[in-house]
Amino acid sequence: MSEYQYYEFLAVDRPLGKEDMAALRALSTRARITATSFTNHYNWGDFRGDPTRLMNRWFDLHLYFANWMSRRLMIRLPKRLINRDRLDTFLRDVNCVEIQTAGENVIIDIWHDYEPSEFTDDDDGTGWLGALAPLRADLLASDWRAFYLLWLMEAQTGTLENDEKEPLRGIGPLNGGLETFADFFHIDRDLVQAAAEESPYTSGDSLPTASTRVAAIAAIPDEEKTALLERLAAGDPHVMAEVRSRIQEALAPTTTEIQDRCRTVSALRARAAEICKERKADEAAQVEAKRQQREREAEKARRARLNILRLRGLAVWDEIENEIEKRNINGYERATDLLADLRVLAEEDNTSDAYSERLRALRSRHSRKTRFIEQLTKL
C-alpha cells in the first residue's frame, strides 16, 4: 500500500479573491483551487503549506486524511460567538483537541490516529469535509453535540474515570453531520448509539419544533431583534447562527438539571456493551436467515433438476457415457454429478437395486479410466 495524504480546505464566511488564490497557487501548482476551496493529495512527499496558517488567513474548515490512519479536522469560529467556559466543560479532559486563538477567531484543531481492523484503499478522503461542514453552523448555533462526541472518544479509550458524568444529557437524535463525525474519527458505534438514546433538549427526544422556535424568538427584546435584522441586511453571515443559538439556549436545561439527569461513563459503556450484544445477535440472525434462504433456493433448484432428470429417463445414462468418453476432469465431474442425482431418484422411486446394477456395469466398462474411478470413489 503506497503512501497517500489528502488535504482539503473550505472558505465559508468569505470567498477567496484573486490575490488569495494566487498566494495559494504559489504553495501548490497541482492543487484544485476555487473561490471557496483548496484541495490537493500527495502519494509521495508533503504539502508545503502550514494548515494552521491557511486557517488563520483564509479558511473556515480543513480536513486532513492519511492512509496510515491519521485524521484531522480544523474548524474556525468567530471568537465572540463561542462561550469558552462552556467549551471547556466538554474539552477539559479531551487530549485530541487543541484550541487556538487567531485574531477575532478561535480554531478548534482535532487530530486522531487509530488502529484499523483492516487496511483498505477504498477511501481517498474525498467527500468527508462536505458531509462534516454543517457541524460548523451547528456549533455557531450552540449545538455542542460534536464536542460531546470528542468527550466520548476519551470515554472509548478509557482515559476518563468511570464515575465522570457526560457533559450533555445525550446527543440524540443524531443528524448527518454528527454521524459522519463519528465515522470519520472511528468512534465506537455502539457507544455513540448509547449516547444517542437520550436527548439534551428539554422537549424530550426531539429537536426544537416550530412552536418552540417562535416562542424563543418572541422572547428576544425588540431592540436586539432590530439589531439582528440590521446585521442580516448588511450581509453578516452569522446572524442565523446567533438566532439558532438563542433558541438552543432557551431550550437548554439548567446546570443542575444536567448534573441530575446525566449518565456516567460506566453507565454508557455498560449500555454500549448491551447494544453490541444485541447488534451481534441481530447480525447472526440475519446471517442465519440468509443461509436458510440460500438452502431453500438450492433445494428448490435441486428438485427442479431432479424432476427434469426423472422425465428424461434412460437418456441420462447415455449422457453420462458421453461425458465419460470426453476423458477430462470436467467430463468426469459432470458424469458423477449426474450419477449422484440418479441415486437420489432411485432411493425416492425404490429402484436402488436397478441403479446399483447399472453403476457396477458402468464401473466395469471404464475401470481403466483411473481419474474417473477416483471421482466415483468420492461419490
Image (tube, helix red, strand yellow):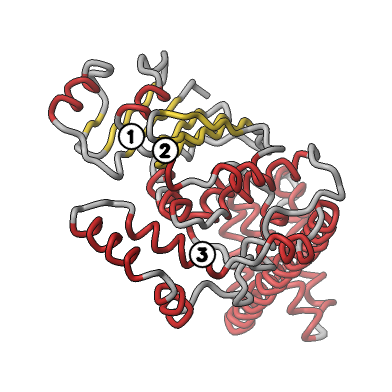
Q: Residue at x 71, y 56 (%)?
A: 190
In this view of the protein, which residue sits in the foreground, 310 or 254? 254
Q: What secondary structure is found at the residue carrying circle 2?
A: strand
Precedes in sequence: disc 1 or disc 2: 1
- Residue 361 visible here: no
Give the vertical position of 87 relative to 262 (above or below).
Answer: above
The answer to whether residue 267 is left or right of residue 109 is right
Which one is nearer the viewer's eye here, 345 or 207? 207
Residue type for callout 3: Gln
User: Would you call the spot at circle 1 few (<14 residues within 10 Å), some (14-19), or many (20 or more)?
Assistant: many
Q: CA distance from mark 1 to mark 2?
A: 7 Å
The numbered mark, 3 or 1, whose residue comes first in the sequence reads 1
Disc 1 + disc 2, Cβ < 8 Å: yes
The label shown at residue 76 is 2
Instruction: Report the residue at 66% width, 63% height from top.
Output: 196
Q: Quadrant of residue 306?
A: bottom right
Camera-side residue: 358 or 44? 44
**Residue 46 percent coordinates (x, y):** 41, 16
**Label 2, label 3: how far apart the Cα atoms are:** 21 Å
Q: Amino acid at mark 2?
A: Arg
* SS for callout 3: helix
**What x and y, as percent, mark residue 144?**
56, 53
At label 1, the amino acid type is Phe
Q: Residue 308 placed where, x, y %?
A: 58, 80
Circle number at residue 378: none
Location of the C terminus by quadrant is bottom right
The answer to whether residue 314 is left or right of residue 164 is left
Is residue 148 depicted above or below 70 in this figure? below
Q: Residue at x 39, y 69 (%)?
A: 221
Q: Vertically, is 354 above or below 153?
A: below
Q: Which residue is mark 3?
A: 248
Residue bearing the label numbered 1: 59
